[in-house]
């Protein structure tokens, strides 16, 4: 995407960045940083800018599986792992990552309250599950962290407003299972997340009463799977989508009218000229936050910190905002126009409103369930039924 204010970015912002990150030096030239992540965050414009500023080449290892990304640290040289809070907890418990000294990450002092206290305001709900603001810190004083969130979003319900009516753009998670949308609904096809979205829908419909929707007991998993099997027999689902482009194509073609969706999916469907909106979930959003961990075995500790500080400096946050993701710190402002900030962060003309509004409506966070193997076994049983 084209970014305006080029003179500012190339001039003053670049100068400030050089001070913050350090100009390429002789010792950095020719160095490499091994980073494990996914295609939506290890994007070429970001990797190239880091190399331009530091002289360090990023060698990305990309995999859509959060489990595979974490396990990569067992078998290959890795400096930084990019992961959601759900698998950060796993990597920490497995001693694959090391504590991050927050005194070496100065911009984290600018983090939004959601990631400091675990809730946007004292009156906001505390989202259940792997809530970054409650699980990322190593010590009570919050001087060390398991990872540093660098981008986040809120997943909800994507729908075609010409087919699915929604007053004030508001829908319940239970709407995913409304018989009216039989044959036109899609559900995320990854076991633990598909199960969580199904549990959210069943909770909304009064069909599941679980103490923790993000960590179902085996009996509760059985209840969800039985329900999903019945919906499958009714031919309720058009698809169980697994990839961004897959859902875009399903919704753009009209094969799917409603789905648990990602915000960038909705934007892409709109670009194709098909009506698509992102509902404010009645119960609240399913949120997630991807960030950077430092491998327990890195041989490039200083560069690992430099990578994290680059992400919080603003350039990367601005580039990710352009494709639909938020930064936990407000340093992005020097790389976006006032109009972009009003739209992307202020919510002008944007489903769901401002980021502050969204921050205050988190219901659950993406969470790796304690009994994930059981989830996977039963999910595979459902798909095969």
Image (tube, rainbow, N blue to C red):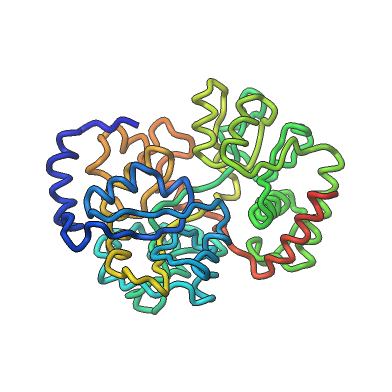
Residue 229 on image: x %, y %? 83, 49
Of all residues shown, which one is farthest toward the top? Answer: 273
Q: Nearer the viewer, residue 123 or 25?
A: 25
**Residue at the (30%, 55%) spot, across then down:** 312
Q: Is residue 210 above or below residue 275?
A: below
Q: Residue at x 12, y 43 (%)?
A: 12
| Residue at horizontal 16 percent and vertical 60 percent from the top | 26
Depth check: 110 or 144 in front? 144
Residue at image coords 41%, 74%: 297
Q: Position of residue 287 (x, y in %)?
A: 52, 53
Residue 369 image point, x, y percent: 64, 65
Work out whether 46 lies above or below 148. above
Image quarter hosting the N terminus: top left
Looking at the image, can residue 250 be seen?
yes
| Residue 305 pos. (x, y %) | 30, 65
213 sits to left or right of 87:
right
| Residue 175 appears in the picture as rendered | no
- Which residue is more in the foreground, 252 or 30? 30
55 left or right of 379 in image: left
Please identify the residue farthest to the front as the structure is shown: 30
Q: Nearer the viewer, residue 312 or 64?
A: 64
């Amino acid at each position: 995407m084209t970014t305006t204010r080029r003179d500012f970015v190339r001039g003053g912002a670049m100068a400030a960045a050089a001070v913050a990150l350090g100009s390429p030096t002789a010792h950095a030239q020719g160095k490499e940083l091994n980073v494990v992540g996914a295609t939506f965050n290890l994007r070429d414009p970001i990797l190239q800018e880091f190399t331009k500023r530091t002289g360090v080449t990023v060698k990305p290892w990309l995999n859509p599986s959060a489990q595979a990304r974490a396990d990569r640290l067992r078998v290959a040289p890795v400096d930084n792992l990019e992961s959601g809070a759900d698998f950060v907890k796993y990597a920490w418990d497995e001693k694959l990552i090391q504590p991050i000294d927050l005194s070496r990450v100065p911009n984290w002092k600018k983090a939004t309250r959601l990631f400091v206290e675990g809730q946007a305001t004292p009156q906001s709900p505390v989202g259940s599950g792997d809530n970054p603001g409650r699980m990322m810190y190593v010590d009570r004083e919050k001087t060390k962290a398991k990872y540093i969130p660098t981008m986040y979003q809120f997943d909800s319900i994507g729908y075609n407003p010409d087919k699915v009516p929604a007053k004030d753009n508001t829908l319940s998670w239970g709407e995913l299972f409304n018989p009216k949308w039989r044959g036109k609904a899609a559900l995320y096809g990854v076991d633990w997340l598909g199960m969580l979205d199904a549990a959210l829908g069943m909770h909304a419909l009064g069909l599941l009463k679980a103490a923790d929707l993000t960590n179902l007991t085996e009996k509760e998993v059985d209840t969800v799977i039985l329900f999903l099997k019945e919906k499958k027999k009714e031919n309720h689902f058009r698809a169980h989508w697994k990839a961004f482009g897959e859902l875009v194509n399903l919704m753009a073609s009209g094969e799917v009218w409603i789905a648990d969706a990602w915000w960038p999916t909705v934007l892409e469907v709109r670009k194709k000229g098909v009506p698509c909106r992102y509902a404010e979930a009645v119960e609240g959003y399913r949120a997630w936050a991807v960030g950077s961990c430092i491998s327990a075995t890195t041989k490039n500790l200083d560069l690992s910190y430099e990578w994290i500080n680059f992400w919080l400096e603003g350039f990367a946050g601005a580039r990710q905002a352009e494709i639909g993701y938020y930064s936990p710190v407000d340093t992005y402002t020097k790389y976006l126009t006032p109009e972009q900030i009003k739209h992307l962060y202020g919510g002008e003309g944007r489903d769901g409103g401002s980021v502050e509004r969204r921050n205050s409506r988190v219901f659950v966070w993406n969470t790796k369930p304690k009994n994930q193997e059981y989830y996977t076994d039963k999910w595979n049983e459902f798909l095969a039924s």
